[in-house]
Amino acid sequence: MIHRSTSIRAIAALAIALGLSACAGTSSDTVTRGATLDTPQRAAPMALNVQQVRVNVPRTLAVSEKNRFYPGGDIVWRGEPIGDRYAQVGAIFEDAAERGTKGMKNGLPVVMDIEVERFHALTEKARVFTGGVHAMTFTVTLRDPATGQALSAPRQIKADLRGYGGSQAMAAEQRGQTQKVRITDHLAHVIQIEMTNPGSYQATGLGLMGALNTL
């Protein structure tokens, strides 16, 4: 027999859970300041008011400038003149995040922290001959703007994109679809999907090169 107090607590917990779920599509005025976002592998959609985006590209990530088909390193980027690759990658993510969260002004107020874990685009050699995969992995954490408290656990997002090579790359360049344009557009799309429906983005299978980029 279930004890009466245990049954009452269970019913109350269920009612609270259902109430929080119903609040997902309401304005920020109906969501308590201390609420946290439950982010399992497939969380329920929630309306968000993204007040700030902060991007971190850790200087501990290894940068490779080697012109090989598949060089080592965490950051491989040739879409801009040689320079501070950390700053260049950070600017790409900032632009993508701004576009991906545009219009997200109704709902739970949040600050979105992005930490880049991997940004492995194509080298000159791969772009001329074979193409490959733009392998991009980053984590997203949502925080309370007032307290800085995490409202969600860090969520890792893998946002790989097929990289063009040879004549396909040249044709894309002529259309204005440079590596930087394609990558920024793709990241904006992924961020928009993940912020409106966490866990819903699924990267397209990219064959052997996609598998190599998980190593």
Image (spheres, rainbow, N blue to C red):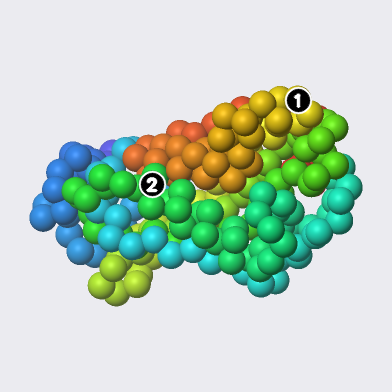
Position of residue 206 in the picture relative to residue 145 (left or right): right
Q: Where residue 61 appears, x then y in whole percent?
A: 70, 65
* Amino acid on which disc 2 is placed: Arg
Q: Which residue is mark 2?
A: 99
Q: Which residue is mark 1?
A: 167
Look at discs 1 and 2 and give the one toward the viewer: 1
Q: CA distance from mark 1 to mark 2?
A: 30 Å
Neighbourhood count class around disc 1 (C-alpha, 10 Å): few under 14, some 14–19, many 20 upward: some
Up-down: is 50 above or below 3?
A: below
Q: The N terminus lies in which quarter of the figure?
A: top left
Of residues 14 and 199, the one drawn nearer to the viewer in this rendering: 199
Position of residue 118 in the picture relative to residue 123 (left or right): left
* Mark 1 and mark 2 residues within 8 Å of each other at the beta carbon: no
> Please, what secondary structure does the residue beneath circle 1 have?
helix
Q: Which of the two labelled residues, at mark 1 and mark 2, occupies the earlier sequence position?
A: 2
Up-down: is 60 above or below 184?
A: below
Position of residue 191 in the picture relative to residue 129 (left or right): left
Q: Choose top left, top right, bottom left or bottom right for residue 125.
A: top right
* Amino acid on which disc 1 is placed: Ser
Q: Where residue 130 appears, x then y in whole percent?
A: 83, 31
Q: Residue at x 38, y 46 (%)?
A: 99
Q: Where residue 185 appears, x then y in whole percent?
A: 49, 39
Neighbourhood count class around disc 2 (C-alpha, 10 Å): few under 14, some 14–19, many 20 upward: some
Could one spot residue 198 in this view of the protein?
no
Q: Residue 202's mark? A: none
Could one spot residue 175 in this view of the protein?
yes
Task: Report how many numbered discs are placed on residues in the image.
Answer: 2
Of residues 78 and 11, the one drawn nearer to the viewer in this rendering: 78
> Please, what secondary structure does the residue beneath circle 2 have?
helix
Q: Residue at x 70, y 53 (%)?
A: 77
